[in-house]
């Protein structure tokens, strides 16, 4: 019985060994939390940002310096042109460009690039230079005197001044050095004024002379302004044209047609008349009504004949001057316009800039420079124009004249 049990035990052990060798071994491993995958570089999602890019100061004088500053975020490379090249994300440089320059900053990354500009204006260096001008010319007996001034910001070395009469050189004067800001009175000591028309000469009534003095006539000095070296004056009888004295011979016209001298203030077509040595002009009393007088050179060709007219020859250095205001007792709510004009080659009326006058009791000075018309032949126009309120729009011209300065 015991032997039988032993066999059974042996058989059971053999079966266990046989099954283990047939199925193999199974290993169980307890795992912890899963490890995170290795990180990879993140690509930028937007181009770089240029926070600032400036020059300070933005304007310099040649030879001075400016500071170029920049600050950039998110850039892989940054370049500044011209000439500077690659730079860091922020910084500054002191520069002294020879001419006005615009700098271009370009910032780049894998998402793209961004650019900005900064400019510096370079102005020429300021250097001191003299500036000689003639401020006055006059006679003392037969001596021609003049004043010369240095209005520049540097001393002027010695120079020559020339004296001309009717564009012909008559004398010269040696001028010693002039300090900046200095004015000196001198004369043409080697010349005596002996032409007809000098003080006390009977021919003065008919003589007229164009006299001119020029500083630095030899062009020996480098000046800040070479265009103001000369001063011209008219000596002797000067040209004068008096509009008041010629008003009765002028051709008068308004928006209602031609007007005949003499006229009265109450004329509904407009009127012009003399009052206490002044010329009064009243435009046609309608909104925007006007009146004009056309003035010429009046003369009598033969004794006893009627007066004829011809174009005026505008003299050199001429100007129109007058004082204009409302006739006493007249008033207007919006003022009135006055102007000088002339007749051009086509027969059209050309008006100089207008001036408004008001019924405030003030006489306003009205002047027109006619020097650009020197030598031209023309007829002149006095023009008055009402505005929206035409009642009481009469103005007076006090001493309206063309004169030589």
Image: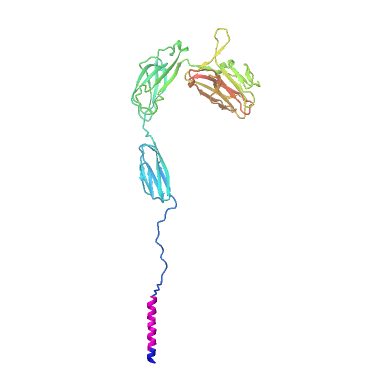
The span picked out in magenta is 6-24
Asked whether residue 10 is drawn in magenta, I would say: yes
Q: Can you tell which quarter of the image residue 301 is in? A: top right
Q: Position of residue 363 (x, y in %)?
A: 56, 25
Which residue, as the protein is rendered here, is positioned at the far bottom?
1
Q: Can residue 273 be seen in this view?
A: no
- Which quadrant holds the N terminus? bottom left
Characterize the magenta stretch by its predominant secondary structure: helix
Expressed as whole percent of the image width and height from the top left, the position of residue 200 reads 44, 12
Q: In this view, does 101 lie to the left or right of 364?
A: left
Residue closer to the observer: 296 or 10: 10
- For image coordinates 43% across by 20% down, the residue present is 232
Q: Can residue 312 be seen in this view?
A: yes
Residue 282 sits above or below residue 199 on the image: below
Using residue 94 as the reference point, say whether residue 307 is left or right of it.
Answer: right
The question of residue 41 being in magenta is answered with no
Which of the 4 image quarters holds residue 131?
top left
**Which residue sits furthest top?**
303
On the image, which quarter does residue 122 sit in?
A: top left
């Amino acid at each position: 019985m015991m032997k039988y049990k032993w066999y059974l035990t042996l058989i059971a052990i053999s079966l266990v060994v046989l099954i283990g060798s047939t199925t193999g071994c199974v290993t169980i491993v307890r795992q912890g939390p899963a490890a995170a995958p290795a990180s990879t570089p993140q690509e930028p999602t937007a181009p770089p940002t240029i926070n600032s890019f400036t020059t300070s100061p933005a304007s310099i004088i040649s030879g001075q310096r400016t500071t170029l500053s920049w600050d950039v975020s998110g850039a892989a490379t940054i370049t500044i042109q011209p000439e500077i090249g690659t730079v860091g994300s922020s910084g500054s440089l002191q520069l002294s460009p020879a001419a006005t320059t615009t700098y271009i900053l370009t910032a780049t990354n894998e998402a793209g690039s961004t650019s900005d500009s900064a400019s510096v204006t370079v102005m020429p260096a300021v250097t001191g230079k003299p500036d000689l001008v003639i401020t006055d010319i006059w006679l003392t007996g037969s001596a021609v005197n003049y004043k010369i001034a240095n209005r520049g910001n540097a001393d002027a070395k010695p120079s020559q001044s020339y004296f001309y009469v009717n564009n012909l050189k008559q004398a010269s004067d040696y001028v010693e050095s002039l300090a900046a800001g200095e004015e000196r009175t001198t004369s043409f000591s080697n010349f005596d004024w002996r032409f007809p028309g000098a003080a006390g000469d009977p021919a003065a009534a008919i003589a007229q002379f164009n006299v001119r003095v020029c500083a630095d006539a030899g062009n020996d000095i480098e000046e800040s302004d070479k265009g103001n070296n000369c001063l011209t004056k008219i000596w002797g009888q000067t040209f004068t044209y008096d509009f008041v004295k010629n008003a009765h011979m002028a051709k008068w016209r308004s928006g209602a047609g031609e007007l005949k001298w003499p006229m009265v203030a109450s004329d509904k077509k407009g009127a012009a008349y003399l009052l206490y040595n002044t010329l009064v002009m009243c435009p046609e009393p309608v909104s925007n009504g006007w009146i004009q007088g056309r003035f010429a050179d009046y003369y009598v060709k033969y004794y006893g004949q009627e007066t004829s007219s011809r174009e005026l020859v505008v003299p050199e250095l001429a100007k129109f001057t007058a004082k204009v205001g409302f006739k006493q007792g007249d008033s207007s709510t919006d003022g009135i316009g006055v102007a000088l004009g002339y007749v051009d080659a086509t027969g059209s009326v050309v008006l100089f800039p207008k001036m408004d006058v008001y019924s405030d009791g003030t006489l306003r000075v009205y002047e027109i420079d006619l020097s650009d018309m020197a030598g031209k032949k023309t007829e002149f126009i006095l023009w008055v124009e009402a505005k929206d309120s035409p009642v009481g729009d009469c103005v007076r011209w006090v001493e309206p004249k063309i004169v030589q300065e």
